[in-house]
Image (tube, helix red, strand yellow):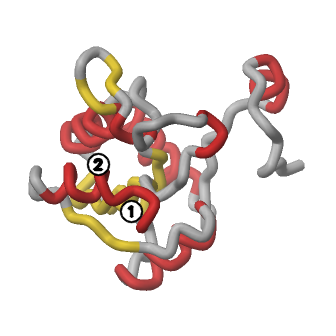
Amino acid sequence: MGVTALVMAGGRGTRMKLGEEKALLKIGGKPMIEHVLNSLMNAEKVDRIVVAVSSHTHRTAKWLRSRSVEVLETSGESYVYDMQFAAKRLGLEIFLTISADLPLITSRMVDEIVGRYEQCRKPALVVAVPFDMRRKIGEDSSYIFE
């Protein structure tokens, strides 16, 4: 089963207080989003890649379009709202949502996650960081699930 990978790259990145859009920050000489896209392109279980951008990330959108990456404009209201908008607009039923700021993700990880989803036969599968780890690295707790 191949899925559509929906890369979320429309946020303001305000927590980091950067002069550059977060997705374009260079890691190892390449923008973060390029690492994510390369992993998705090399994943066997990904058939299509769409990047959700917003008016907050116009430089990221320009960078993507110059590389012929499929882009969808969203409102930039919130991660969840933009994800729902993109899924509805693109007619997606089964898809993988991934943030543009995960430069360490590999194609093997992507294939394993999609494979686990295929096996679980549930409506959704979430891969998340344990709460204690988030606290340890100083992340907020805006999306906590029991």
Residue 7 figure quarter: bottom left
**SS at mark 2?**
loop
Q: Amino acid at mark 1?
A: Val
> Which residue occupies the foreground of this view, 33 or 24?
24
Residue occupying image coordinates x 60% and y 70%: 77
* Left or right of 77 on screen, residue 135: right
Residue 24 figure quarter: top left
Q: Residues within 10 Å of mark 2 (few under 14, many from 20)?
A: many
Q: CA distance from mark 1 to mark 2?
A: 23 Å
| Residue 96 shows in the view | no
The residue where tag 2 is placed is: 45
Determine whether 58 is above or below 144 in the image.
Answer: below
Residue 34, x across and y down, in percent: 26, 36
| Residue 70 shows in the view | yes
Q: Quadrant of the N terminus?
A: bottom left
The residue where tag 1 is placed is: 53
Residue 33, x across and y down, in percent: 33, 39
> Which residue occupies the foreground of this view, 96 or 12?
12
Determine whether 3 is above or below 142 in the image.
Answer: below
Q: Nearer the viewer, mark 1 or mark 2?
A: 1
Residue occupying image coordinates x 37% and y 31%: 25
Residue occupying image coordinates x 84% and y 50%: 145
